[in-house]
Image (cartoon, rainbow, N blue to C red):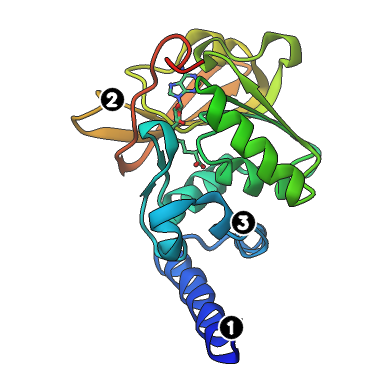
Amino acid sequence: MTEEAAQSLAERKMQFLYALRSKGVTDARVLTAMEAVDRGPFIRGLFASRAYEDMPLPIACGQTISQPSVVGLMTQALEVQSRHKVLEIGTGSGYQAAILSKLARRVYTIDRHRRLVQEARDIFEAQGLSNITAVTADGSFGLAEQAPFDRIIVTAAAEDPPGPLLAQLKEGGIMVLPVGQSDAVQHLIRVRKTANGLEYDELRAVRFVPLLEGLGKET
Ligand code: SAH
């Protein structure tokens, strides 16, 4: 890389962090994790040059890598602590899981597309992120053999929070997910599981790909 190219990459990365802060990602641990995980390797092909823009971008299997500020806000809302075991539904590119891996003890991530899971695993290995397990499955059913989880994050929109995920959340746990019909308005919500039941709060309007049933066609 020339000196000029290196400088412009450094500038783009600084702008990336600035955009996160200006959109409300203010938690120091989350910002540090997002600074440590380069979004570049998670985007292949045509759109790779736009990795440091605050935009969702297309990835394989007709899916999208989420907008970084939304990743940051969801991660912040999840209040992840270093001893936590976290479940993510919707591995996609693996970017969100990589950020979670910097904050939690253990991360399990599930996608219905085998190809996305394989590509994400390759990046995790290349980056030395050894506390992530990526699984090909229908994530609506969670991961019973590793339950319960301290935190659950869903990065595809369902009409309602899937029952098995609520069941696999620890008491005292938090789940963050988009709910609503896929092409209508969706809301990001946070569910806290307390001794007295579930508490919901609505965070903001968002737009995610839908949570679909079964495995992806190519698998
Ligand atoms: N978190 C990702 C973006 C996810 S896009 C990232 O950081 O890049 C949403 C993903 O959810 C897609 O990859 C899609 O295949 C997956 N998905 C949709 N329905 C699913 C289901 N029932 N189980 C598991 N994954 C699902």
Please tell me whether mark 1 sits on a helix, a strand or a loop: helix
Q: For the N terminus, which image quadrant? A: bottom right
Task: Classify residue 91 as left or right of residue 122.
Answer: left
Name the N-terminal-most of marks 1 and 2: 1
Name the N-terminal-most of marks 1 and 3: 1
The answer to which of 5 and 180 lies nearer the viewer is 5
Q: Report x, y in % for residue 107.
A: 71, 33
Question: Can residue 34 be seen here?
Answer: yes
How packed is label 3: few (under 14 Cα within 10 Å), some, or many (20 or more)?
many
- Frontmost of labels 1 and 3 is 1
Task: Classify residue 25 as left or right of residue 135.
Answer: left
Q: Looking at numbered disc 3 in the image, what kind of residue is underneath it?
A: Val
> Which residue corresponds to mark 2?
180
Is residue 171 depicted above or below 29 in this figure? above
The answer to which of 206 and 60 lies nearer the viewer is 60
> Which residue corresponds to mark 3?
30
Q: CA distance from mark 1 to mark 3?
A: 25 Å
How packed is label 1: few (under 14 Cα within 10 Å), some, or many (20 or more)?
few
How packed is label 2: few (under 14 Cα within 10 Å), some, or many (20 or more)?
many
Q: Report x, y in % for residue 16.
A: 47, 69
